[in-house]
Image (cartoon, rainbow, N blue to C red):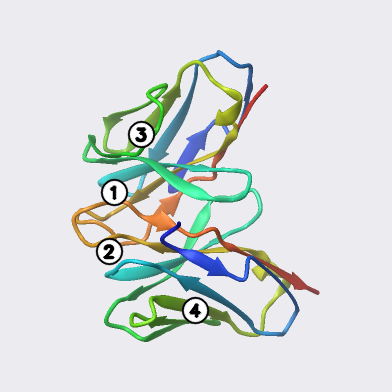
Amino acid sequence: SQQGEEDPQALSIQEGENATMNCSYKTSINNLQWYRQNSGRGLVHLILIRSNEREKHSGRLRVTLDTSKKSSSLLITASRAADTASYFCATPPPSGTYKYIFGTGTRLKVLA
Amino acid sequence: DTAVSQTPKYLVTQMGNDKSIKCEQNLGHDTMYWYKQDSKKFLKIMFSYNNKELIINETVPNRFSPKSPDKAHLNLHINSLELGDSAVYFCASSQDRSGGNYEQYFGPGTRLTVT
């Protein structure tokens, strides 16, 4: 099974609502990253949270990390139609390798 | 200025042909990657190069051969294309030398369709 798995697979909300998506992983990590992919485009890095951090903010984004549960969540507050995209978590294995592993993504649709 | 660029953006070809995808990054990064994204959006790493040296070579058929002429370029050549090779291929780069501590920058992708 995959290292990173996002939940839910798809999410549809109204503009102005908050969107929460979760990521679970299986092995120990030194950081976890979230990326956004707009339709037909490449992935764009959103935020990186280190294993010794529990919460991190960037604009309307809030990421939490629970290493005991091996899970992370991404919260987008006051969503906009432009937030419509797929969101992926990515976990690199312990240091010494370059093998990022991406989850299957959450497809978010924000309705205007 | 484009950070990571790929050419071509679309590639339609017949089974059995050989094709190449080019990637260039102007970020001064040491590490570059090739990923394959299938129709279900699953993104899987194929290759990683650090300073022109192959670091990761996942279980990819040897019909796929990456080439890094310099740190800023990582090209992907595919021989004897098969239907199952149809996917979107992404190039990416990162500053990271030790594995995983920096974000990756992705190119716009190359949509390969094999008929």
Whether residue B2 is visible to the viewer of this picture, yes or no, is no
Quarter of the rendering containing residue A92: bottom left
Residue A111, how many percent across, how many down? Answer: 79, 73
Quadrant where the N terminus of chain A is found in the figure: bottom left
For mark 1, what is the residue? B29
For mark 3, what is the residue? B74
Q: Nearer the viewer, residue B14 or A85?
A: B14
Label 2 or label 4, whichever lies nearer to me, is 4
Report the amino acid beneath label 3. Leu
- Residue extending farthest to the front is A1
Q: Nearer the viewer, residue A20 or B91?
A: A20
**Circle 4 chain:** A
Residue A26, how many percent across, how many down? Answer: 37, 67
* Element assignment for label 1: loop
Can you say whether A17 is above or below A38 in the image?
below
Report the amino acid beneath label 2. Asn
For mark 4, what is the residue? A73
For mark 2, what is the residue? B101
